[in-house]
Image (cartoon, rainbow, N blue to C red):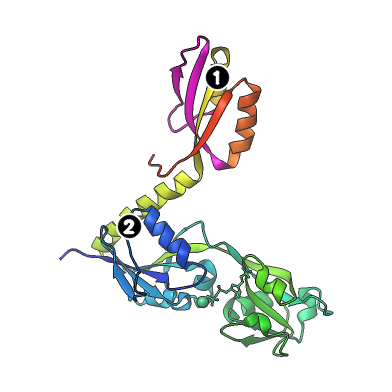
Amino acid sequence: MSETLKIAVQKSGRLYEGSMKLLKECGIEVSNGNNQLRVTASNFPIEVFFLRDDDIPEYVQDSVADIGFVGENVAIEKNKEVETIKKLGFGKCRLSIAVPKSGELQSISDLKGKKIATSYPFILSNFLNEKNISASIHEISGSVEIAPRIGLAEAICDLVSSGSTLFTNELKEIETILKSEAILISNKNLSEGKKVILESLLFRLNAVRKAKNNKYVLLNAPNENLNTICKLLPGMKSPTILPLAEEGWSSVHSVISETDFWNIIEQLKANGAQGILVIPIEKMIV
Ligand code: PRP
Ligand code: ZN
C-alpha cells in the first residue's frame, strides 16, 4: 500500500478558511461536509485531520499528524520539536500587549508589578524577561479580552488581527511582541515515502504562491520604444512581442511582480505604452 501524508488543519477559527482554500488552489479536493475529524483527499495522497490549533504542534511532533498548517504564534508558544517548512502568506496577525484605553497604563514600563492575562505565557514571559519587567502572568485559555473589565488583570497579551476585539473592549495596544502568519510545520522524521508527497505538495504551494505575487501584463507599444519597454518587463525568460495590424506598433506580453507593479506601470506609460491589461495568474511554474 502506498503512503499518505497526514496534515493537521485548524478545525474552526481564523486559519480554517485559508487552509482549505490553499489546499483547493493546490488542486487537492477535500470535502468536510459532515464536520468530520478526518477526511481523505480524493485526488492526492493526503489525509486531513481537523484539530484545535493549540494541539497541532504536539500532534505533529508525536507523529499523530505528519505536517500541519498552524499560526506561527501557536508554534512558537508550544515550543515543540517540529520543523518549520515555510510561511504560507495568510492568517497575518500580531501578538500584542493591550491595556484599558482610559487607564493610567501607557507603556510596558508601567506593567511592573501588574497582572497580565494571556493564552501565551511562554512568549510573554520570555518577552518580560528580556525587557526586565517583573509582572505576573495570569494564564487563561479564552476570552482574554474581558480580563481587565472583570478585574482579573490590568493588561492582556493577545492576538490582534483586525483590531475589532480590542476596539469593542475599549483596549489599546501598547506593544507588539510578535508578528505572525500561517506556517507549514513538519514532523522531524518523515519516512522517504512521506517526504516525496511533501515535496510534491511544496511544489504546488510554491506555484500558487508565485502566481499570487505576479501579474500577467499585455500592452501595445510603439516600435521605437520597444527596447526600453522590454527592459522594464523582463518576464519569466523575456517578453513576447507580436506585431499589431497597425504599422509601427507591437503587442508586448510579460509577467511582473506585484511589488514593483505600479512603479513599472508608470514607466511603461511614460514610454508610450497604451491599452495596458493586467491579468491575475492562477498557477506559475518556472
Ligand atoms: C484571537 C484573539 C482575539 C481575536 C482578535 O482569537 O484571541 O479574540 O482573535 O482578532 P481581531 O483583532 O480581528 O478582533 P483566535 O481567533 O485566534 O482564537 P483562538 O485563540 O481561540 O484560536
Ligand atoms: Zn486556539
Range drawn in magenta: 233-258
In the rendered image, the vertical position of residue 79 relative to residue 215, given as above or below? below
Extreme residue in the top direction: 247
Q: In which quadrant of the rendered image does the N terminus lie?
A: bottom left
Task: Please give the name of the residue rendered at 45% of the width and 49% of the height, measured from the top-left corner.
Answer: 209
> In the visual, does 20 lie left or right of 190?
right
Marks 2 and 1, how far apart at CA:
40 Å
Circle 1 sits in a helix, a strand or a loop, which is it? strand
Seen at 43% across and 30% down, the residue is 237
Q: Residue at point 57% right, 83% down? A: 142
Which type of secondary structure does the marked residue at label 2 adopt?
loop
Q: Position of residue 208 (x, y in %)?
A: 42, 49
| Up/down of 154 relative to 277, above or below | below
Q: In the picture, which quadrant includes the C terminus?
A: top left
User: Which residue type carries mark 2?
Assistant: Ile
Q: What residue is pinned by disc 1?
A: 221
Residue 47 or residue 68, whichever sits in front? 47
**Ligand 1 within 8 Å of the CB at mark 2:** no
Mark linked to residue 28: 2
Q: Residue furthest bottom?
A: 151
